[in-house]
Amino acid sequence: MDIQNETQFSAELRLQAKRLTAHCNLYRDADSRKAVTQLITTAVPFFTLIAVMFLVAPHAYWLTLLLAIPTGALLTRFFALQHDCGHGSFFPSRPTNEMVGRLISVLTFTPYDHWRRSHALHHQLSGNLDHRGFGDIETMTVKEYSQLNAWGRFRYRLYRNPLIVLVLGPPIFFLVLQRLAIGSNMPLRDSLRGVLGHDAVLLLVYGTLVFLVGLSLTLLVLLPIYFIATWIGGWLFFVQHQFEETHWDGADEWDMKIAALKGSSFLVMPPLLNWFSCNIALHHIHHLCSRIPNYRLQECLKGNPELETVSPRLSIWQALKSSRLALWDESSRRLISFREYGRKQGLQAA
């Protein structure tokens, strides 16, 4: 594409983004009744399943492990509801959002205020090559990777290995790293207050549970739930921006709305999976207007056919294959794998 055509394409894309943003803003109004309904339909099966798991664990632990799958999926749904509270979109009232978000955070092990701040930075800077590292998977460009020494390349390849980034990483991040006051860009005093206060509540709540039923039973029941929830949530977060035809620009060319449309995926999933994840698969709409409650995202999608085609659509299989991608190739403007990088390097050497 020559410079003139590229300029025209960018101008048209900006107009489209502006038009779609205006459409999405029509769906910002929250509904308290729908929010309460979502809380009830999540909490009732979640706590019922946990009670059953505690009862059967001493007698049929295999059944406890089996029940951990839907329970973990419900915990992922709780996290999605906390996510809406953090955006101020779940309830019409800000105090209600904050109260509910903090209550849910006791279940998700995610300090509400600290996470809300770091996630806001993710929305403000997503797709900006010059301001990476806030609430996203670390991603290097081909040029940056090429300039690393052998040890630097090894560390980055290890970090981007699917076993690390999708299997070991999510439990470590949510259960361990979230206990630390890092990554929010908040004043350290404020971060410490939010995180340490949250940790104190966790000690009180789960310490009481350990006192009542014992440490071993508590760990045998809760750990599988948290591992499954973090695996689901970690994978969903990964595929929302890590796919071949994603979009990155340097700060001079970067546009938040274009990054929302072209750098956020539209993951096509069955209705049941959309229910468990609170429609977060419609991630392009969420980044275009983060104030839309999850229960209105589908309505927003159906209200404008352009939203069906403007962003990259991914099947579950395509999203799974994206785990091998690791480097942003600025020349082809897409994510590539280490294997493709090696192949390109070999061709250039030849």
Image (cartoon, grey):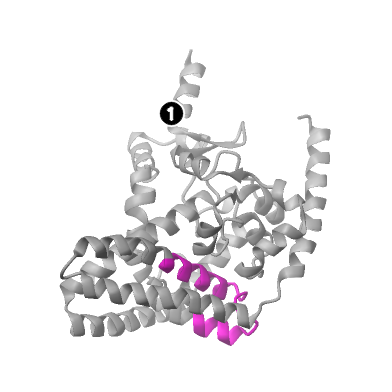
- The reply, left or right, for residue 152 in relation to residue 315 is left
Residue 232 sits above or below residue 12 on the image: below
**Region rendered in magenta:** 74-100
Using the image as rendered, state which of residue 268 and residue 242 is in the foreground: 268
Instruction: Name the amino acid, label 1.
Output: Arg
User: Where 272 falls versus 33 (above or below)?
Assistant: above
Secondary structure that dominates the magenta span: helix
Please state which of residues 222 and 174 is positioned toward the viewer in this rendering.
222
The residue that mark 1 highlights is 339
- How far across and how far down the image is residue 145, in percent? 46, 36
Q: How many marks can you see?
A: 1
Residue 92 in magenta?
yes
Q: Is residue 297 visible?
A: yes
Whether 42 is drawn above or below 310: the answer is below
* Nearer to us in this view, 176 or 30: 30
Residue 253: percent from left, percent from top = 70, 47
Q: Residue at x 30, y 83 (%)?
A: 205
Between 244 and 305, the one nearer to me in the picture: 305
Count neighbours of disc 1 (C-alpha within 10 A) and say few if under 14, some if 14 to 19, many if 20 or more: few
**Position of 58 compared to 230: left or right?**
left
On the image, which quarter does residue 191 sit in?
A: bottom left
| Residue name at image x 67 percent, y 47 percent | 311
Tell whether 114 sits left or right of 179: right
Question: What kind of element bears circle 1?
Answer: helix
Seen at 55% across and 49% down, the residue is 241
